[in-house]
Image (cartoon, rainbow, N blue to C red):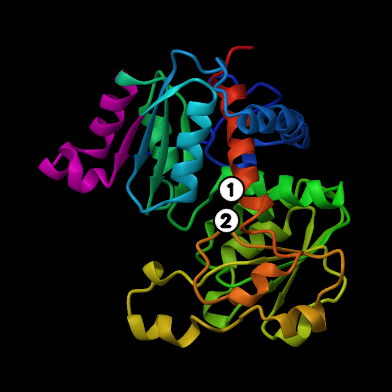
Amino acid sequence: MLRQSPQKINGNFKGKDIISFDQFSTRDIKNIFSLVPKMRKIALLAKPSKILAGKIIVLLFYEPSSRTFGSFSTAIKQLGGQTVEIHNPQEFSSVAKGETFEDTIRVFEAYSDAIVIRHPQKGTASNAAAVAKFVPIINAGDGTGEHPTQALLDLYTIYEKHEKLDNLVGVLAGDMLNGRTVHSLIRGLSLFKKNTLYLLSPKQLKLSKSDFEDFTKRAIKLVEIEKETDIPKNAHFWYWTRVQKERFKKLKEYEKVKNSFIVTQKLLKKYGNPNLILMHPLPRIYEIEKEVDSDPRAIYLKTEIRNGLYVRMALLKLTLGII
């Protein structure tokens, strides 16, 4: 199937696919951010609005998910919409009978106003957008490709703390090769000026050559490091990620690198600073010790995860909601 380049947002989200962060401008990001306080208020009041009244959104998840699936489902319902929720369609839908991916998309677009899709294969969200003619596709993670809505909530979390998205120093640690959240976050931060990102990973999990070349053509400075001793002490944020077991063909290869970098209180004390925030897209496996959770700088289970709900509500309002 030929993939189509997703349409730029250009200040108008209405009815558009959300596939890649390359669709966004700084203006588009600010438009989403401007709605977050209102979305937070709706959620905290626990009283559904009518912004998505009458809308039905399919959540089509070929890959396991808890936060992304749960926050999209919650966001839709908080805004007065309804969901059709499909977990593992390869086992529990007509896909198991041999139905093609293309036909699955055509079937569910006939029932809905949008499809939120997660798939283990890179580029699948773009393929779905090429098939769907009547409803927008929202990428909830496509293999090792991108996760644009995760990047939006991460950018908002950084902005909420530091009140800017330029002139930042960040540390991204873990799986740079397979980390779709990392790929989208780099794209997002490259839209803003004078940002420097230190990429801490084992040699086997460095950014691919093509990704590194692509990203360095953008307005962002990337510094690849392999040792914790190279972590800058003036970072505004640390973005830790897990080594993704499901991306390895051989278990022994995963075992070699799974605990390469672990956040401990000692590491935070030595290389952190009072204004740092420690982030993680979750799930957290071994890479952040549980004792770190009580540190006020550790926000992955606090504000970051909550911002996921509010940011996705804002995006859905702009894409599908009543103007």
Res 8 visible: no
Q: In the image, what residue occupies the spot 41% across and 51% down?
A: 65
**Residue beneath the point at 52% across and 18% down:** 52
> Is residue 143 magenta-colored?
no
- The circle drawn on residue 254 is none
User: Residue 150 shows which numbered tag?
Assistant: 1
Q: Position of residue 23 (x, y in %)?
A: 63, 36
Using the numbered discs, state the Cα–Cα distance from disc 1 to disc 2 in whole angstroms.
6 Å
Task: Please give the range of residues in magenta.
Answer: 84-110
| Amino acid, disc 2 | Thr
How many neighbours does mark 1 have within 10 angstroms: few (below 14), some (14-19), or many (20 or more)? many
User: Which one is in front, 179 or 84?
Assistant: 84
Q: Is residue 148 above or below residue 270?
A: above
Q: Give the amino acid at mark 1.
A: Gln
Q: Is residue 39 above or below residue 220?
A: above
Number of numbered discs visible in the structure rendering: 2
Q: Nearer the viewer, residue 156 or 304?
A: 304
Q: Main secondary structure of the magenta part?
A: helix
Q: Residue furthest left?
A: 97
Q: Nearer the viewer, residue 99 or 72?
A: 72
Residue 44 in the image, given as x and y percentages of width and height: 64, 33
One can see residue 243 in this view: yes
Residue drawn at (53%, 83%) of the image = 259
Image height check: is 28 above or below 309? above
| First reached walking from the N terminus: tag 1 or tag 2 | 1
Frontmost residue, 38 versus 209 = 38
